Image (tube, helix red, strand yellow):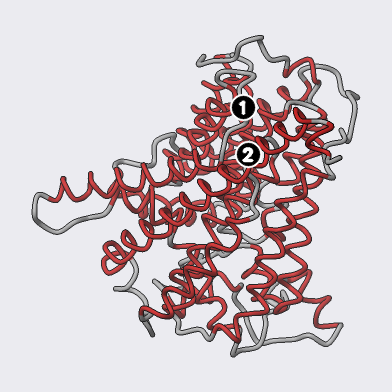
Amino acid sequence: MSLDTQFPFAGQVATGIAGRLLASRVLIAIASWCMIEVSDFLFWQIAPDLVLAHTSVLSVPDFGEALLLRILAMIPALFLPSRFELPSQVFAWVFYVGAYVPTLLFGVPMRDISLFAFAPLLIVMIATLLGLSFLDRVSRRPLVSDFAPPRVALTVMVVWAIVTLAYSIFITGSLLQLESYASIYDTRADFAETVRLNGGGILGYLISPLATVIAPYLVAWGIVCRRRILWCFGLVIGIVITLQSGSRSAFLEPILAAIAALAFSWPLGRRPLSPIALIGFLLAVSIVGFGIDWFMAGGGQIEWNFSSIFYFRVMAIPGVVAGTYFDFFNSNPFAYWSYSSGAGLIVRLLGFDTTYELPPAKMIGLIYFWGADTNANSNAWFDGFAEAGIAGSLFESVLLLGYAYLINRLATARNAIIVTATCVSMAFTLVNVGMTVALLTNGLLLLLVLIAITHKEDMRTPGQAGPP
């Protein structure tokens, strides 16, 4: 007698679940393919004005190569998580959308990179995405219990914000540095020069974690727990930093955390959010930004201001920069951190020495883009490749997986919705910076500490979380 005859209801349930999973995966694959096609179209409309005027294009893929690259770009969509519940699932999809896909669509063909030469790094990239996709299965056990008194984490963040902003105003001499959006790049350069001349080197280690970690964490916390003072304070932090330094990301990261917090928590108790929502959101803002720029041009020269923010910086530039990293360091010596005074001394003692006096980000900016003042940062895969080849990429990928494992376990010990929403904005930062830099400079380690010292009672969620 068959199992279906003995347990007909169980067979129907299993068939229904399998059908829903297959349908969900098919929809995700379709959405991913649409994203690839729309992104490719937008890129070749915008790139001639934003990038190609400043860097050379060695090759434009023919139909056969373009199809092969699209097929390779689709592979991770077949196994990436089908829902968002923990930070590792967010990291997997953001690295796919913001780093993996644009690298294959734009970075590889623009530099005429051989797929055979690129294959080892491609395997590392797919393996990392695969690890992130299945990490939630082994990292749901809470890591810590409540050991710090209530409100300790909030106190630390408020003090950090007040001290940092006060110090920034003291260094620059005024609160308002940004006069208009058109002067944002000049403001950014003036801020960096003022900080350098006034000996404010420590400010970078204070202000970057404030923008990348503390402000988004406060916004997500305030929205999920319906505490208006928290999300208002987080948004104010982002606005002040933008006015001071000209950093657009300082303003956008709390906004992104707010959108993620609303999407994950409203209404509370519904099915976990699907990656289709992320893809749809990115495509919607990209198309809207493109439409606004086209409309505002009125038939004249298009400035691409909105497209630069909502599409190009998120879904194109990381791939373009990744291609230049591989193009240069695949045929030149690796950096081996030799430009760093501390790490450089160690690697020289080990016999790994190069002649690079600039870090890879500035060197790539000098060779391929606007000049040495351009920080052409890249993600863990290509920052690691610049430092030590495939071994460096593996090292930084392991760091990323280890960090995702720890923050998953901390999220389950506190409030997974708040932590995961915070990690959405942080993940988009990570597709533009290596793990060895982000852990300290961008505050990734600080976030682990803040979550660990947060008392679970402080994150108590109302029965129905909605818009504040």
Q: Quadrant of residue 165?
A: top right
Which residue occupies 72% across, 39% down? 447
Q: Amino acid at mark 1?
A: Arg
Q: Residue most toward the left?
A: 299
The residue pinned by badge 1 equals 271
Q: Which mark is residue 123?
A: none
409 left or right of 231? right
Residue 44 locus on image (x, y percent)? 30, 66
Q: CA distance from mark 2 to mark 1?
A: 9 Å
Residue 250 locus on image (x, y percent)? 50, 41
In the rendered image, the vertical position of residue 246 relative to residue 142, given as above or below: below
In the rendered image, the vertical position of residue 64 relative to residue 272, given as above or below: below
Question: Does residue 425 show up?
Answer: yes
Q: Are marks 2 and 1 in contact (CB under 8 Å)?
A: yes
Badge 2: how crowded within 10 Å, few (<14), some, or many (20+)? some
Q: Quadrant of residue 216?
A: top right
